[in-house]
Amino acid sequence: MQRRFLVTALPAVLAAPLLAGCVSEQRYNQLQAAYDQLQARYNADEATIQLLEGRLKVTMSDRILFSSGGYHIDRRAQEALGKMIPTLQGLQNTRIIVEGYTDTTPVGPELRRQGISTNLDLSSRRADTVADSLIRQGAPRNLVSADGRGEANPIASNDTPAGRAQNRRIEITLVGPGT
């Protein structure tokens, strides 16, 4: 009798992981479609797009978005961010996390006069500026968040100008269930 129960229960036990897999596959397909859309819209010098474990991450250099040492974006930066909007609008239930990063170079006197005393402050202002731009251009306001990371999580050495340039970046990560 016990053996019969196992044979009868086996299809149900096997079906549960398969059904869970379908949801993961659906999410993967949604992220893959978003990845493909963004890859088609951005040149390699504008953004790096990565599909990582259920997340889609768009990394933009600060030189594309901000003047040196600044946090205001111009029309060209607005246009670069605007390329993302159709994709973001298509993923209505996906959180949009904007993170700002800096190198280890201390902020200069001009920024200090504006009330920005640390790289963490600067990265926060940059992340807020990008998030505000995305929202103004049509990203779902309730799904966008911004956070400054300052010098945390460098992706290159801060000992060279090229490494510092790589560390000054904005990462926009799409996380969540999709549509």
Image (tube, rainbow, N blue to C red):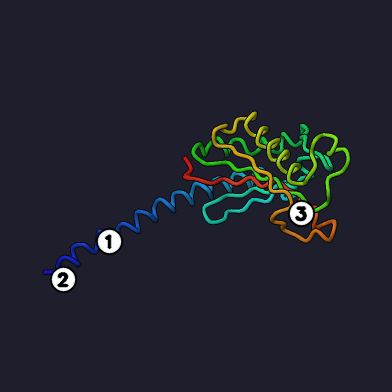
- Residue linked to disc 3: 166
Residue drawn at point x = 14 percent, y = 69 percent? 2
Residue drawn at point x = 71 percent, y = 38 percent? 80
Q: Earlier in the sequence, mark 2 or mark 1?
A: 2
Point out residue 106 in the picture as x, y percentages from the top left corner. Answer: 83, 49
Q: In the figure, is residue 69 to the left or right of 170?
A: right
SS for callout 3: helix
Give yes or no for contact between labels 3 and 1 (Cβ–Cβ under 8 Å).
Answer: no
Identify the image quadrant of the N terminus: bottom left
Q: How many badges with numbers are in the image?
A: 3
- Residue linked to disc 1: 13
Does residue 71 lie above or below 119 as drawn?
A: above
Report the disc number at residue 25: none
| Amino acid bearing label 3 | Gln
22 or 40: nearer the viewer:
22
Q: Earlier in the sequence, mark 3 or mark 1?
A: 1
- Residue linked to disc 2: 3
| Amino acid bearing label 1 | Val
Q: In the figure, is residue 144 to the left or right of 61?
A: left
149 or 51: nearer the viewer:
149
